[in-house]
Amino acid sequence: MATTAPIDTLSRLALGTAQFGLSYGVANADGRVAPSAVETMLRQARNAGMDTLDTAVSYGESEAALGSAGVCSWRVITKLPPLPAGVVDVAGWINAHVEDSLRRLRIVQLEALLLHKPSDLLGPAGRQYAEELGALKQHGYVRAVGVSIYDPTELDALWPVWQPEIVQAPCSVLDQRLIRSGWLAKLRSRGVRTHVRSVFLQGLLLMAPGQRPAGFRRWSGLLDRWLAWCVAHEVSPLRAALAFAQAQPDVERIVVGADSPAQLEELLEAAMRAGPVPPDDLWSDDRDLLEPSRWEFA
C-alpha cells in the first residue's frame, strides 16, 4: 500500500522563473510568459505563502521581468554563468555579473548566489573565485553562496575543496540520484540547505504517451509504468510528482515553474492536497533521460 504525503505548506515551494525569460520546458506550448502574466503569477504565489524565487543570468529576460514586476519582498536566488576562458580579473567578472543582476532585479541583496558550473572552483582561478564569493557575502550583497549541480558526482569533486552553503539539484521520482547517492542526507547533516528542481522533469512526467516527442520512445516502458501507477492510485501525475518531492524531509525548497497563471493555480492546488507517495522503484540512472541538455526529440 502506498504511503501518503502530508499536506505541505506552500512556503516550502520556490517559484522557478525560467519561463519568464525563455520558452522553457519540453511540455511548454505557450512560449515565454508575458509581462502581465508575470505580475499575476507573482501575486498568486505570494498570496499562497511562497517567498522564494529562482532565476539565473542565463534565463534570458527573466531577471529583468522580475525587476519590472517588483520583487523587493521576495527571497531571490540567481546563478552565475560559467566562467569564460581567459578571464584574468575573476573578482571583477563576478562583481560585474552580481551588480548587473541586482540592477535588473531592482533589489539590494540576493538570498543566494549559485554557480551554474561548480567546476569553476576547481580550476586555476578557483581560490580567487572562492575568495570573491566570501567577500560578496561579507559585504552584504548575498546572504548565502552555493552551487547548482546536474549530477551529485559533482559534489564528490567539489566537497574536499569548497563546501557550499546551499545546493540546488534535480530530483524527481525518476531522478533519485541525489537521494540514492547519500548526498541529500549528508548535506542536511552538514547544515547545507538543499533545493531541488526538475520535479516534473521539465513536464515530461506530466505528458500522456501520445504527447511525448519521438525521442523519448526508448523510455516508454518506464514512463508508461509511472502513468499506470498514477491511474491505479487515482492520483494525477502532477500531484504524485509533487508528493514524491514533498516526502523528502531533507529538502528545504522545491523549485517549481509554470507557463501561465492557470497552470500555476493548478500546481498550487495540487500541492495542498494529500496524495500517495510513488514507490522508489521507478528510478533511472540513464543520463540521456535525466539530463535535458542530452535530450534528442526526434
Image (spheres, rainbow, N blue to C red):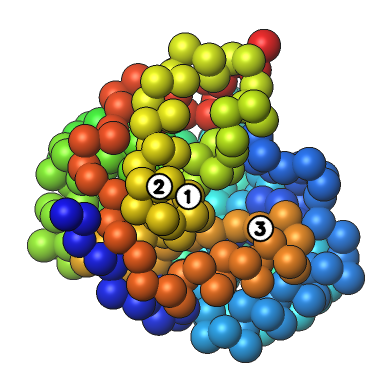
In depth, the one of 16 and 127 nearer the eye is 16
The residue labelled by disc 3 is: 258
The residue labelled by disc 1 is: 237
Q: Is residue 44 left or right of residue 132?
A: right
Task: Write the residue at 23% across / 45% down.
Answer: 279
Task: Write the residue at 59% across / 35% down.
Answer: 208
Query: Disc 3 on helix, strand or loop?
Result: loop
Q: Quadrant of residue 149?
A: top left
Q: How many marks are shown on the rendered structure?
A: 3
Q: Is residue 207 left or right of residue 106?
A: left
Height in image: 282 above or below 274?
above
The residue labelled by disc 2 is: 230
> How far apart, in angstroms, are the residues tagged by discs 1 and 2?
6 Å
Task: Write the residue at 35% across / 20% down.
Answer: 286
Tell me, yes or no, whether the two marked residues, 1 and 2, touch with CB atoms within 8 Å: yes
Choose the circle earlier in sequence order: 1 or 2: 2
Q: Mark 3 or mark 2, which is nearer to you? A: 2
Residue type at the position of mark 3: Ala
Residue type at the position of mark 1: Pro
Which mark identifies residue 7? none
> How far apart, in angstroms, are the residues tagged by discs 3 and 2?
21 Å
